[in-house]
Image (cartoon, rainbow, N blue to C red):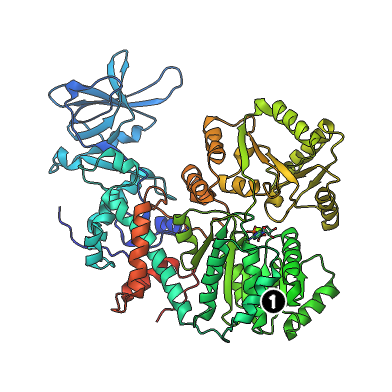
Amino acid sequence: MSRMARYRLDDPVEAVRGIGPRWSADLAEKGVERVADLLDHLPFRWEDRRHLLPLSQAHEGRTLTACGVIREVGTSRTKNRGLEVFSVLVDDDSGALKAVFFNRSYLGELLTPGRRLLIHGTPRRMRGGLEIHGPAFEVLRDDQQPEQALGWIPVYERLGPLTPRRLRGVIAEALDGLETVEDPLPARLLERLSLLDRDSALRQAHRPPPTVPAEQLAMRCTPAHRRLAFDEFFFLELGLAIKRQRRRAERRVGGYRISAELRRRMAGWLPFRLTGAQRRVLREIGEDLRAAWPMHRLLLGDVGSGKTVVAALAMAVAVDNGFQAALMAPTEILCRQHARTLAELLAPAQITVELLTSSLTAGEQRKLRERLACGTSRLVVGTHSLISTKVKFARLGMVVIDEQHRFGVVQRADLVAKGEHPDVLVMSATPIPRTLAMVLYGDLDVSVIDEKPPGRQPIRTVVRSAEQREQVFAGLAQALAQGHQAYIVHPAVEGASGLRAAEEGLEEYRRRFPQAGVVMVHGRMDPAERDAALESFASGKAAILVATTIIEVGIDVARASVIIVEDADRFGLAQLHQLRGRVGRGAQRSYCVLLASPRAEGKALERLEVLAATDDGFVIAEKDLEFRGPGEMAGAAQSGYPSFAVADLVRHRDLLLDARRAAFELVESSSGGLTRGLVDETLRRHGQRLRLAEIG
Ligand code: ADP
Ligand code: MG
């Protein structure tokens, strides 16, 4: 067959023979406008039609591919259900086999005696002998050898008007007529990483060579898939590298002075000694502040590892240098907690901490906004109300974002835009795997607090099935009798039904523990009521706090030493780990009980056991990624997790590491490895998401 180039990737799909204006309009609705889009629609499996078998070797239940001449055709009806039966007898000299199609008598026009037919399917034993029902088939042209029709045959998911079978036809036509696809990646890179060229990768992802083993296909780890996955990672990382480089071209507005005097004073404010990890991170931040470009740093560390303290000191430096600092956190509870902590820590510095949330009256909000706009307020803590266009700063120099995965990229950018290239520190207590961090926050520098303040007790974590519920609560009764306090968490994040579950839970606990004092907090509560509930738990008046996951962030009660999570299998591991961090803050031994839901299966329990086995947030996050996939990880969606067509953070981990290194090297190298082609493709794929508009 000639491989005349008739199509280019940029051509409209309508250019492809077989796709008329009607189909192309329907395809456009599915986002398929160009030939490239059509070819991005990869097969989800491949039929193994690599080997031809003589019909004499047909066996009941064993899938085969065979080729023969059509001898007889016939139509009839089934007795019971009245289906139309169209059958052909195929003969290859070694034997014959009856192929049967139901309600497809139109095939009679195509499958006529004398034609050569390739069939693929699984024979079954009927009264009259072996038959093959509804086989896949192909009519061979006169000049076509059966071998030419063999191989891994792509099976596509339906795409708008195109049935799997039609898709196979038009995609084959598009590939046959496609001009050689240019490769944007430097040849040296391909060679170094043993990657297939893009032209071959695109063709082979649809039509793998027969030598490709079935397991490679099942895992999307053929050379073709690896190349396509590499590109998905590479252009994302390239975009992140470009974004980072651009930030480094920004000039900070004013410089910082961190005098020895300030440092001495700061040490004096603290009621404790900083941990080694906290000191290391402060050094890293200090270096950022002395650089010519603004800081963009991600601070990772478990709940209670002391991130807020670090942020407080960084903000104090900003304020001391005449800037304003803003800390944004996702919930009011958390904001109030932060405001309290900061006020205590920074009281010796005579810095007033302001709090901007929607629970302020309109008048209070307006007055605070005025103070921020004229610069008399130097440090503010707030929810996303900080992003409001009404909020203006006189000289915003530092932005801290807590639990940053709760905010989208755009929200973060909106706050940052209120200053002139301010320093940005984003914090997260949700441990995330290194690979996911590279994809989500690859443009940021990363600091990790991997050490807990001294004196923390290890938390004993156990997994219990629903049948063990009674024992769990008997255990809790004992703990309460000894004066412990407990959290009981429900996975009722949103929605009325979730809330009902938590409320039913509340009734149950009040019945079980009539003496204890049981209070509840949830996201839909009025703030005053919630405060009252928290207050009575914090003061020890109530021994049990029933909560939805909002306690994940922002409640700090040292005397609480037990946490029971109901329906724990409905949470992600990283989230459970974060919840668990609510206990173990005081001197006494703490417990975390993960109570599985009645429906939980072996695998879910096994997943929970990971938490019992380790306290290392990063190990837990890696496991979570393996079990649930990146899309399910806490906050991945809000943070703009890109949906990859082929690439997979677990299966193609090695490719991500290679892609990141290659992309950053390319951008940082002075030899100008960054070509227009690479930049264009980056913009096309990720320009919007990364807010990369034009790159020179
Ligand atoms: P995070 O923000 O990481 O959850 P915080 O900064 O809120 O952690 O600190 C948690 C608790 O530990 C707070 O009560 C804080 O005062 C205390 N803390 C922080 N750093 C230290 C330290 N180095 N030594 C003792 N206690 C500390
Ligand atoms: Mg915190």
Regarding ligand 1, which quadrant of the image does it lie in?
bottom right
Q: Nearer the viewer, residue 80 or 159?
A: 159
The correct choice, above or below, for 663 with respect to 394 in the image is: above
Q: Position of residue 76 (x, y in %)?
A: 35, 22
For residue 57, above or below residue 664:
above
Cβ(mark 1) to ligand 2 < 8 Å?
Answer: no
Q: Is residue 3 visible?
A: yes
Give the vertical position of 670 relative to 562 (above or below): below
The residue labelled by disc 1 is 389
Q: Which quadrant of the figure has residue 63? A: top left
Q: Nearer the viewer, residue 176 or 613?
A: 613
The amino acid type, in three-letter code, at marker 1 is Thr
Provide the secondary structure element on which disc 1 rests: loop
- Left or right: residue 683 compared with residue 125: right
Q: Quadrant of residue 228?
A: bottom left
Observer-nearest residue: 412 or 289? 289
Which image quarter: residue 588?
Answer: top right
Q: Kindly identify the residue that appears in the image at 39 percent across and 53 percent down.
A: 647
Q: Where does the image place residue 665, in percent across and percent down from the top left?
A: 33, 70
In this orientation, which residue lies closer to the viewer: 62 or 392?
392
Residue drawn where x is 29% and y is 42% of the image = 216
Identify the residue shown where x is 60% and y is 38%: 569
In the visual, does 22 lie left or right of 350?
Answer: left
Q: Residue furthest top?
A: 127
Q: Position of residue 443 (x, y in %)?
A: 47, 68
